[in-house]
Amino acid sequence: MADRLGTYRSKRDSRRTPEPVPEQGPLPEGRDDTFVIQEHHARRLHWDFRLERDGVLVSWALPKGVPDDPKTNHLAVHTEDHPLEYASFAGEIPAGEYGGGQVKIWDRGTYETEKWAEREVKIVLHGERVSGRYVLFPTKGKNWIIHRMDPPVSPDADPMPGDVRPVLPAERKRLPQRKDEYGYEFAWGGRRLIMYADRGPAQARDVNGDQARAPRGLGEALGSRRAVLDGEMTGTGADETYMIFDLLYLDGRALFDEPYERRRELLGELGLSGPRWQTAPSFDDGGAVREAAREQGLPGIVAKRLDAPYDQAKADWRLIAV
């Protein structure tokens, strides 16, 4: 009988990787009902989808993860079988090793098999984050498709907007009279960019809607979160940093009608802080922020009404020079 884990073992050295590398021998006997989805931050972000079958984990790499709507199919690249022990693996595969990068358990649970054939696998997942009927089928070579057979997970989900024009502040000389009704941010004096992150590298557009370069790694840092961000690219060359100050869409929900204060709260919960991006700070004391901007050589500050939506006519953003 062929060694079903031979390919897996040939790509790994147990002295160099924390992954389980079992010795050749009889495969364990399970119930063929375990599944795991692992978020894998390798050279390219993807999700590893694994189903227990005949003593191994039959595996596919999903660049966009598991689809949550039957209208959208996702690519599933068939990879080598993995040992059952891999269902509990999470950790850092060293750089230079096969699949080097961080592995997190994104979801796991049990599944039922409706059909398992060479060209079609029908299953029902019972996980904490994913549940429902799915089918996988090959298209060409190792490329398969994974399709959701049940209704959408969120029937009322908003589609991700594709052409957001940023709200622009109006120039003012003085702070607002009702100072406590506004939040205050630094005006960074950089290039305004809207970022679109959809389970992969982020895409950027400038104020004119033209494509621009996004900071490498930002989309991957969001993982499975789908988001549209507003911010400014500051600095030059290798020192450029994307300062993020607004969140316009998150995981199937458009946030344009939410007040600025709520959007900032949701943005803060994402914890976006990386080598080329930061969540811009927001303050409640406009005078102190203005003085700090002057000391740091920044062009000014922006006052944003706390209860206003993201709408050019209603947002009431004010650019105040130092």
Image (cartoon, rainbow, N blue to C red):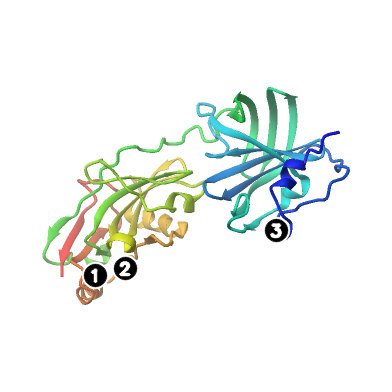
The residue singled out by tag 1 in the image is: 286
Choose mark 3 or mark 1, whichever is in front.
3
Task: Name the residue rendered at 54%, 27% in the picture.
Answer: 70
The residue singled out by tag 2 in the image is: 283
Residue 18 disc label: 3
Q: CA distance from mark 1 to mark 2?
A: 7 Å
Q: Is residue 68 above or below residue 166?
A: above
Q: Residue type at mark 3?
A: Pro
Instruction: Say what secondary structure mark 2 lies in.
Output: loop
> Are circles 1 and 2 on residues that touch, CB within 8 Å?
yes
Using the image as rendered, state which of residue 191 and residue 236 is in the foreground. Answer: 236
**What is the crowding at mark 1: few (fewer than 14 residues within 10 Å), some, or many (at least 20)?**
many
Q: CA distance from mark 2 to mark 3?
A: 44 Å
x, y percentage for residue 189?
Answer: 21, 61
Task: Name the residue rendered at 74%, 47% in the picture.
Answer: 9
Task: Name the residue rendered at 70%, 30% in the picture.
Answer: 123
Q: Residue type at mark 2?
A: Phe
Q: Residue type at mark 1?
A: Gly
Instruction: Say what secondary structure mark 1 lies in.
Output: helix
